[in-house]
Amino acid sequence: MIKNYPNLFKVIALLFFLSACEEKEEINLKTSGVYIYNEGSFGNNNATIGNYDPEINEYTPIAFRRQSNMSLGDVQQNASFHDSKIYSVLNGSNDIKIMDANLDYETLIKFPELDKPRDIAISDDLAFISNWGPYNENFALTSSEILVVELETNQLVDRIETQEYPEHLFIKNNKLIVGHASFDGSISELSIMNIDNLEIEQTISVPKGPQEIIEDENGKIWIVCTSGSLVQLNSSLTSIENQIDHENEILGDIDLFEMDIFFFSNGDIFSLNTTDYNVTNTNISVEMQTPYAFGIDPVSGDFYLGDAVDYANEGLVQRYSNDGELIDSFTAGIIPTQFSFNVY
Amino acid sequence: MRLGVLFLLLWFSNELWAQKHQDSITVLEEVSVQGNFEKQFLPGNAIILPKAKTLEFYSGDNISQILRQNSSIYFKEYGNGMLTTIAFRGTNASQTAVLWHNFNINSFTLGQTDFSLLPAQAISEISVIPGSGSSMGGSGAFGGAVLLENPLSFNSGNKLSIGQQIGSFGLLNSKLNATGSNGNWAYDTKVYWGKAENDFEILQTGEKQDNASFERWGINQSIGYKISNTEKLKLAVWYNDNFREIQPPIGSTRDINKQTDQNLRTHLNYEKIGKKSSFNIATGYFMDEMEYQLNQAISYYKVDRWESFTDYKYHFSARHQVKLSARYNYIDAKNQNYEGGRATEERYSLGALFKGEIWNGIDYALHLRQQLVPGVNIPISPYAGISYQLIQKGSHRLNLKLNSSYNYRLPTLNDRFWNEAGNPELNSETAWNKEASIHSNHKWGKHEAGFSITAYHNAVDNWIQWVPDQNNQWRPRNIKEVLAKGIETQLDIKIPIQNEINFFADFQYSFTQSTVMESESNPNEIGKQLIYTPLHKANVSSSFSWKGFSLDFYQQWTGKVYTTTSNSDIYALESFLLSDIGLKWSNEIWTTSAQVKNISNKEYQLYSGYAMPGRNFQISINRTIKIN
């Protein structure tokens, strides 16, 4: 899950400014739209970004295609948001499309070394891309890398060899956190790379299936492991500080709302308090054929859950209020994989 | 079982030896070694024979181009010259049988044919049996059967023909054909080679298509020997070698992604014809080898097959005949994805076919076929067909044809033996087809017209589909029921305009409604049209000819195609009209032609995400040398 915060930042800045002037004014934040990123079927070039209006419960299925008058590409693996821009990582197309917050296409990152990209993280004018690289004789990976791209030119400026199967990325304190997760679970670890010298300083073993990496309100880094654990790193990113083992597998997509981390496991939504580490079942049960995406509206706290169904047809999205009421259920694109929230 | 088949063969042969002194001239005309005897037992079916002009126009293409122009068939094409699979009468690619000289040449791993591996240059005759008459093709002919043949003639002069075609995107095609006979020998040789850079402009993006080149060559050699007036031998060998880069989806790039295919098809036929009977025995070896490479990763399979069949046909009265047939197939597939890297299977089938004339103008056929494969539940497959000549007055004829049959399709080797996913206990798919057609032919002086309309209803049950199980492991299951029904119409006219100027036109329209009736895995697809099956399709072929010149137009209109089982318009492929034009001049020695394909530069896709070329050009020259 990612959140589109530029407007939020502006509003917060405005709040600070207003409070300094001692003319306090009530401003209600609103989520104007929810972008739903749909992976699409491999080889069909049908990845899409749709827009959901939570006020009128209306979904516009091919918002990017309509706005930019072009197809997005093949297999949207991840999308990242930075500096009012969306970076859509297209694993099948082997490129990263860059668009503004209104889904107007701007440019793309593409060069021959970009081979099965998985995720992108940005720090100032540099982008870091987890790149699977080519298959060996047995369809295994042997030369995965972190590719460093200069965003002014979108050209490759450096390549760092890394453990295979790099997946999710996160930047914290000038360090790039890279999750590595092979399908069979034989590789389950994190690499911590120093962005200044591009050296991998640390590798940390974690339970099977490390996926999304988030930062909580206390500035602590959490990684969800699909085998059923939530792992908290210490502040210096050198080791695991806390590990919460859940009774069941956890969906690899987690989100934060206020002081709690929420996750989806075995049909229920759970919360993890980041202060006392208590896990609570919200008693919100959601029936899905193929749970695939999870996100929380940062303003309303509404839960959004993406169901990939049979991977070949449009998936379903269900929206629940924070207290468990089903607000809406609608057809999204093929394999809904991620949500982002436009707040103003 | 093998002993049983052997006994059957010996029994047939003994019966024939007993007749060897009998005169056989009348029957000789009816059956030849290579003849389409399968068709003769199908009075209730409309059989499509593509026009010679169409065969020639698309001779540098794959046979899919010819079939597409001459029938309701839709082809899914994963890019230009790439994997091409058939969708016929609302069925999937595994549900149409492709036979070469009565041997099924569908891939036994996937169960379907990649038509990009069937260049038109390799084949002399193509015919299509839509629907259930194709049960004679054995397993899997729900949509129909495509019959490919390279017939021999013992009475023809020797002819050598050399041709060269060049075209847009680096297209080069060379061919050498030699046919003829000499005393008791007859031969037909086809040697072909072709390549294309295939770097056409992607109309959607303006970029050049990358990683889509292909190159192929092959030889199709048939040799016949007339042992006596009643006995013939035929040996046929077809080797095809195809290399291609795998065209990526629009906007995508690939590092190394390519595929090579090698196909060797050989068979030896012996035929003996008696006054009231004929005996045919054939045995063949078939090899399909494929190597697919993505980066350094390689997928490889090789399937060796030994297949034999025999037919014995007997006229038990002046108007009725029976054909008994037996077939044996041994399959040895090496595939790294099978448990232990290998799967073997033996298949047997027995058939009894009756055909005759009930009354003047009323022909019938009855078939019974039973295939046996250890571990697979296969029903008996009956067929009944009738043809009734309603009107015959001078040069006006009106025929009514009816047929119905119950057919089956065996699970493929992948369905049964894929490591940790295949299910050896899968049932065969079944289909109950009913069909009626009216055909009329008329002649007024030199004007000719023909019209036909066919309606069919085909209920397919136990449809096999790979779906994820509770552990997200994809497995094949018998889970769906599909009803395919439709109408196919055809009108052709031939009109002499002035002295030596002739006009010919052929119009076809098809309505294909293929609906999912039941689905265990996805209730949302119930009532929806099958994917990659256009509801409407129309073709027009027309030609003006004057002396040695011919101006030919070909148009195909393909309706909207859904690519998701939910029938979402968002992911559907839009309808499109393709137009090709060609000018040809020929005399007894030379033939030259120039063609423009997709003259309106229409952007279209035959499979979601894969570009097809816009306007493109080809010129050809051909020289024929007659010897004798």
Image: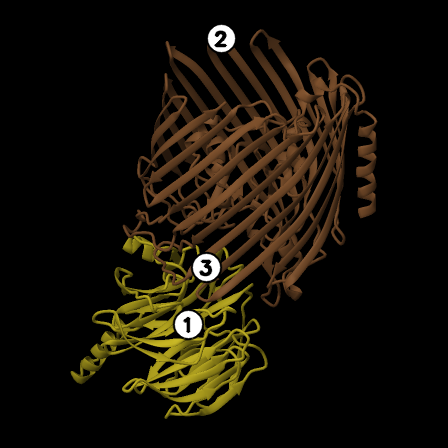
Residue shown at the point (39%, 84%) measured from the top left = A216
Label whose residue precedes the other's in the sequence (3 or 1): 3
Place of residue A185 in the rendered image (x, y in percent of width and height, measured from the top left) = 54, 78
How far apart are labels 2 and 3 at the CA level?
A: 57 Å
Q: Which residue is mark 1?
A: A132
Helix, strand or loop at mark 2: strand
Q: Locate residue B535, reporting x and y percent.
A: 49, 37
Q: Chain of mark 2?
A: B
Residue at 48%, 91% in the rendered image: A242
**Among the chains, which one is yellow?**
A
Residue at the image position 65 percent from the left and 15 percent from the top: B389
Residue B1 visible (yes or no): no
Instruction: Identify the amino acid type marked 2.
Output: Trp
The disc labelled 1 sits on which kind of residue? Trp
Q: Which amino acid type is marked by label 3? A: Phe
Q: Do the CB atoms of the residues marked 2 and 1 lie less than 8 Å apart?
A: no
Name the residue that disc number 3 marks.
Answer: A42
Cα distance between the residues tagged 2 and 1: 71 Å
Locate residue A278, reporting x and y percent: 51, 87
Whether residue B171 is situated above or below residue B124 in the rendered picture? below
Q: Residues within 10 Å of mark 1 (few under 14, many from 20)?
A: many
Disc 3 crowd, CA 10 A, few/some/many (<14, 14-19, 20+) = some
Q: Which residue is mark 2?
A: B444
Asked if residue A24 lies left or right of residue A306, the reply is: left
